[in-house]
Image: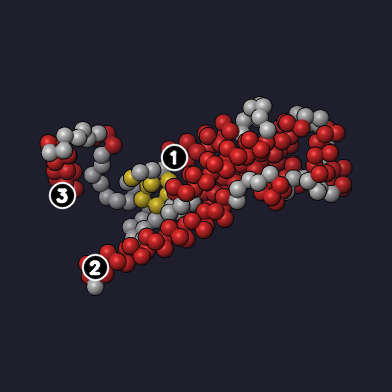
């Protein structure tokens, strides 16, 4: 097949002329759809004059989620501001790299999971029922909501879900400064796709215009 001939020719040139070692375990000769390059997996071909669709490789998703678990581990013993500062840095960097990908739905689910982990961290950090009520009141929760829920449970993950009614998403983003990663992605994605579209139009017109 021609793709294999091109691969072998490129390998020969790199190793013979440039004295570089090619790692054949990471070198593919295959159709673009389904292949991976620099952490991106190609899902569709681009139609004539249009861009194709990519997503992050599964290993990159798992690596991100593992880092989030580590940062938000509830017994870390650091302040919530430290946790969110580290989270924001990780999320901005990751989304900045993968902004070209189609990850809107993934990010929606990811943010729900992150917010629940932050609520769990707060629940553990606040320790006592009285302190929890005090902290939640400071965030503007209505009194009837406080009376509805029992605030002494030691099931942190379970209570983190219940706290969705007591600590709003807005409080996490505005008071605790958790980055709105979905909004951040939408802005970057629009800019990157426009830039890539301009480059694609230029190349297409240069070849066929």
Label 1: state its secondary structure: helix
Residue 38, picture quadrant: top left
Q: Nearer the viewer, residue 142 or 155?
A: 142
Label 2: state its secondary structure: helix
Disc 1 to disc 3, C-alpha distance: 31 Å
Disc 2 to disc 3, C-alpha distance: 25 Å
Lower sequence index among marks 1 and 3: 3
Residue that badge 2 annotates: 206
Residue that badge 3 annotates: 2
Lower sequence index among marks 2 and 1: 1
Q: CB under 8 Å between callouts 1 and 3?
A: no
In screen coordinates, is 142 left or right of 193?
right
In screen coordinates, is 45 left or right of 89?
left
* Residue 181, horizontal then vertical, whole percent: 57, 50
* Residue 71, horizontal then vertical, whole percent: 58, 33
Using the rendered image of the protein, determine whether residue 169 is visible from the camera's viewpoint: no
Lower sequence index among marks 2 and 3: 3
* Disc 2 crowd, CA 10 A, few/some/many (<14, 14-19, 20+): few
* Disc 3 crowd, CA 10 A, few/some/many (<14, 14-19, 20+): few
Residue that badge 1 annotates: 60
């Amino acid at each position: 097949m021609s793709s294999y001939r091109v691969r072998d020719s490129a390998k020969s040139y790199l190793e013979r002329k440039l004295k570089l070692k090619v790692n054949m375990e990471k070198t593919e000769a295959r159709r673009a759809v389904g292949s991976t390059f620099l952490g991106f997996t190609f899902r569709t071909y681009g139609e004539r004059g249009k861009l194709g669709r990519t997503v992050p490789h599964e290993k990159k998703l798992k690596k991100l989620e593992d880092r989030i678990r580590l940062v938000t581990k509830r017994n870390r013993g650091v302040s919530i501001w430290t946790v969110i500062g580290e989270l924001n840095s990780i999320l901005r960097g990751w989304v900045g790299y993968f902004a070209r990908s189609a990850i809107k739905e993934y990010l929606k689910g990811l943010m729900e999971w992150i917010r629940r982990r932050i609520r769990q961290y707060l629940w553990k950090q606040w320790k006592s029922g009285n302190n929890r009520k005090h902290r939640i009141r400071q965030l503007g929760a209505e009194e009837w909501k406080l009376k509805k829920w029992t605030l002494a449970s030691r099931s942190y993950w379970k209570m983190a879900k219940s706290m969705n009614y007591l600590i709003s998403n807005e409080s996490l983003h505005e008071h605790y400064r958790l980055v709105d990663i979905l909004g951040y992605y939408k802005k970057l994605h629009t800019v990157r796709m426009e830039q890539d579209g301009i480059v694609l139009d230029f190349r297409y017109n240069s070849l066929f215009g």
